[in-house]
Amino acid sequence: MTVLDRATWVARRTRQTVSVFDNGWTVLRHMATGADELAFEVDGLTIHCPNAPGARVPVYEVFAEDEYSLDWFAQGLPDDVHVVDIGAHIGCFSTDLVRRFPGASVHSYEPTPSTGAYTVRNVESNRLGDRITVHRAAVGARAGTLVMADNGPGSGHNGVLHLGESGATEIEVACESIADAFAASGGRVDLIKMDAEGAEYGIVLESDPALWSGVRRVVMEYHHSDDHDFGELRTFLEAAGLALVRHETGGPGFGLAWFSRDPLPAAG
């Protein structure tokens, strides 16, 4: 990143902080003074977050940038929408979803112990435990355990994709099957959000296609893999009746994709 790019990025983040978050100036002060953690206040929610760049990113992506385009993508979903959030991080997507859909039922999965503690805290401190169930586990094609990298609380480099990287700690975590996740949601899943840091190929491609027959929407981040590519995910989901309605690439083998069983207007 050039000096100019860095200055532009800092200016954009500063504008977002003071315009989106009710306590934006306090957040900026705590960032500048090196506080251990931050508390972002937005529309009645308080999101606690480690004061580290990678940990803060999803807070801005969800609340300032609507990264998953829920203003568009959630159109037509029922007020009591059933959601599975795979790779919940500190709970931004889940808490934003129930802010939009007060009748929603969300099952959130976050396997990293230190990050999952923030997920639980953000759900409980916002009194959302009756609508968001936090599972301190990964999701895979089969139940058991999963070996993954842990780079610290809230790090975006926690997951199977980052095993072997310098500074990462290898940990073993509990893993629930995708079939278990569907069952926990009562057998009804209207929306799946997936950011599994490289585990998405196993979750989807090794699952029973019949599981996906009732899913209405899927938004997923996919990552580079030496063994698989996005085309396989697309083929699997389209065979299950979920059409690709939007696709954004962020680099070789990396991107964000939206699938829908229902017709949707073009994204703005």
Image (cartoon, rainbow, N blue to C red):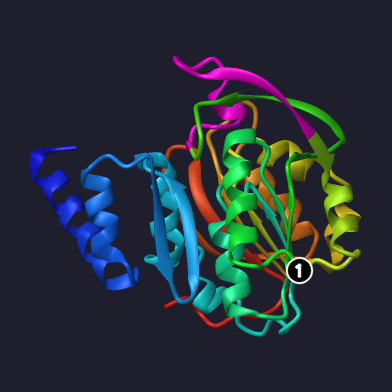
Q: Quadrant of the N terminus?
A: top left
Element class at badge 1 = loop
Residue 7, x across and y down, in percent? 12, 48
Residue 94 placement, left or right of 32? right
Magenta span includes 42: no
What are the residue bounds of the magenta stretch? Answer: 155-174
Front residue (pair 122, 156): 122
Name the residue type under label 1.
Asp
Residue 57 on image: x %, y % = 40, 49
> Quadrant of the image for the C terminus?
bottom left
Residue farthest to the left, as pictured: 4
- Front residue of 154/74: it is 154
Q: Quadrant of residue 172?
A: top right
Is residue 221 rendered to the left or right of residue 210?
Answer: left
Q: Residues within 10 Å of mark 1 (few under 14, many from 20)?
A: few
Which of 75 and 44 lies nearest the eye of the viewer?
Answer: 44
Q: Is residue 10 visible?
A: yes
Q: Residue at x 27, y 47 (%)?
A: 31
- Please name the residue that numbered disc 1 is placed on: 130
Percent x, y for residue 109? 70, 48
In front of the other: 30 or 211: 30
